[in-house]
Amino acid sequence: MYQVYISKSAAKAGKKQGKAFVIKIGTILTQLSKNPIPGQAERLSGEFNFLHSYHFTYNGTAFRLCYKVDEEAKTITVVLIGPRENFYKILKQKLSF
């Protein structure tokens, strides 16, 4: 099993959506801790090739959960959670590329 860490910005974004959203994220993170690269996730390309993106919907809106897997340390670090719209633009700003 992998240890899961959540960045402050990812936690803040999750809390903005409400309690039901936080519960859904908790379920997703439990799944990721057992299998860090499930079918709903994909490895990103280009400048984000060290990250994975988990795709899900909530209240009819497409969301992304972006995370980094460290196989050696058996950790998953959630970098950003947010709606699909402008997600990768915001991710780029957060990572300061």
Image (cartoon, rainbow, N blue to C red):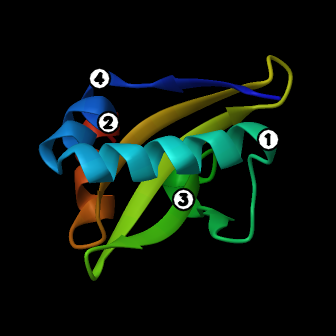
Viewer-closest of 87 and 35: 35
Q: CA distance from mark 1 to mark 3?
A: 16 Å
Q: Hey, what amino acid is under mark 2?
A: Ala
* Residue marked by disc 4: 8
Q: At x 25% / y 60%, what residue is drawn? A: 89
Give x and y (percent) for residue 46.
56, 61
Q: CA distance from mark 2 to mark 1?
A: 20 Å
Crowd around label 4: few <14 · some 14–19 · many ≥20 (10 Å) = few
Please tell me whether mark 4 sits on a helix, a strand or a loop: helix
* Residue marked by disc 2: 10
Q: Quadrant for residue 10, please give it.
A: top left
Q: At x 34% / y 36%, what residue is drawn? A: 95
Crowd around label 1: few <14 · some 14–19 · many ≥20 (10 Å) = few
Q: At x 34% / y 42%, what residue is drawn? A: 97
* Residue marked by disc 1: 34
Q: CA distance from mark 4 to mark 3?
A: 18 Å
Q: Quadrant of the N terminus?
A: top right
Q: Hey, what amino acid is under mark 4?
A: Lys
Name which of mark 2 and mark 3 comes first in the sequence. Answer: 2
Q: Quadrant for residue 12, please give it.
A: top left
